[in-house]
Amino acid sequence: MKKSRFFIASTIGLLLSASVLTANAFADSNPVYLEGIQTMKVPAVDVAAKPGFYQDVTVEFFQDDKWRLVSASEGKEVAEIDQVTLIKTDSAPAQIFLRITGQFNSGCPAIGQISHRLVGNTFEVSVYYANNEWLRNPAAVTCTLAIVPFNRVIPLPVYALPAGDYHYSLNGRFTGSFNLATDNVLE
């Protein structure tokens, strides 16, 4: 148990010293510690430039209460997004969603990790490809030539935000803003 607590504290310290754990729009965003094999898997890690840049990060217990990085991959943002639409509910508290649409020009690409963080009053959102082996080693992967449209809705975590103007930037290409007229809490 002592080793597990040290592991969690040292791993979080290690990750936070180099970056910040990402906030993800999906339920699988929590790190997972596999006690039997003494490894921890982290879905995504932020860097200063963008949320969720390092993905599928694995660290393992090494020796003398030290941990080492086993693997990580760099995320590549989806380039085929054609449109981003802001959706704001009329209910209180308000909910904010970004709907992204576009189309892939082959059967290989797919939407993968979606990461976001709030910096000041701006939501930085990054949408990455899933398993981008077809980008790293195209000769090893066979893709269909089918056009594959996509439509994804991304919830932004706006509950408990104070009233004010907020902005979003998605993949550094799409920007917009919205206003919360009142503090966004249950009355």
Image (cartoon, rainbow, N blue to C red):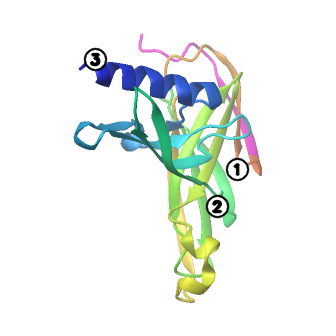
Q: Which mark is residue 78?
A: 2
Q: Is residue 40 left or right of residue 18?
A: left
- Report the front residue among 5 and 111: 5
Q: Give amino acid for label 2.
A: Val
Q: How many marks?
A: 3
Q: Give amino acid for label 1.
A: Asn
Residue 153's x, y, as percent?
A: 50, 51
Task: Tell me the quadrant of the picture where the C terminus can be found.
Answer: top left
Q: Earlier in the sequence, mark 2 or mark 3?
A: 3
Q: Which mark is residue 171?
A: 1
- Report the front residue among 117 and 65: 65
Q: Identify the residue shown where x is 63% and y is 42%.
A: 125
Residue 177 in sight: yes
Q: Is residue 84 magenta?
A: no
> Which one is closest to the eye, mark 3 or mark 1?
3
Give the answer, above or below, for where 175 lies relative to 142.
above
Q: Identify the residue shown where x is 62% and y is 31%.
A: 19
Q: Is residue 74 left or right of residue 112?
A: right
Q: Earlier in the sequence, mark 3 or mark 1?
A: 3
Q: Is residue 124 left or right of residue 111?
A: right
Residue 162's x, y, as percent?
A: 60, 13
> Which one is closest to the eye, mark 2 or mark 3?
3
Q: Give amino acid for label 3.
A: Lys
Q: Earlier in the sequence, mark 1 or mark 2?
A: 2
Q: Secondary structure at mark 2?
A: loop
| Callout 1–callout 2 Cβ contact below 8 Å | yes
Instruction: State which region is magenta.
Output: 175-187
Q: Which mark is residue 2?
A: 3
Q: Residues within 10 Å of mark 2 (few under 14, many from 20)?
A: some
Give the answer, above or below, for where 105 lies relative to 159.
below
Residue 115's x, y, as percent?
A: 56, 43
Whole-number angstrom distance, CA of label 2 to CA of label 3: 42 Å
